[in-house]
Amino acid sequence: MDIVKIIGVGLTALIIIIVLKQYKPEFATYASIIAGAIILFMVMDKLFAIVNLITDLTNKTGAGAEFIKILFKITGIAILTEFAVSICNDSGETAIANKIDFGGKIIIISISIPIITALLELIISILP
């Protein structure tokens, strides 16, 4: 099971980070980043399978491919933002983490404007 492997990597990294914080605290952040990257690579196959499935369904139905691209961008930004925020929080830099989180939310809102506009236009066209 993949989740057992992910948990194993996470717990191993946790033990390494705890030991590093005692002797070389400056390396603990690097260990956290490496563990995060390893876990990300472990789930990449599943992520690509999901992206391919959604892309195939979009192509078959002909439903707004541009909206699907926007949703993929939003999801990617959310994942990367959460990853960066977690690293900042682990390093004790909550102020920077909050700024990154806020910036990610603003970018997501700005990217989603075409979807919001299309939705509002659809609602206006339905209303008498």
Image (cartoon, rainbow, N blue to C red):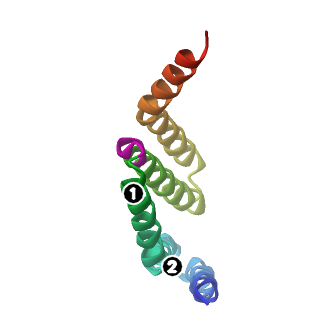
- Circle 2 Cα neighbour tier, 10 Å, few/some/many (<14 / 14–19 / ≥20): few
Residue 53 lies left or right of residue 12; in this view the side is left
Give how far apart the Cα atoms at labels 1 and 2 are. Answer: 54 Å
Task: Identify the residue position indicated by label 2 in the image.
Answer: 24
Q: Say if 95 sits above or below 35 in the image.
A: above
| Residue shown at the point (53%, 38%) measured from the top left | 102
* Residue 96 x %, y %: 51, 46
Q: Quadrant of the N terminus?
A: bottom right
Q: Say if 31 sits above or below 95 in the image.
A: below
| Residue shown at the point (51%, 60%) measured from the top left | 83
Magenta segment main secondary structure:
helix
Would you say residue 90 is visible in this rendering?
Answer: yes
State the SS at label 1: helix
| Residue shown at the point (55%, 15%) measured from the top left | 124
State the SS at label 2: loop
Q: Which mark is residue 16?
A: none
* Residue 79 x %, y %: 50, 57
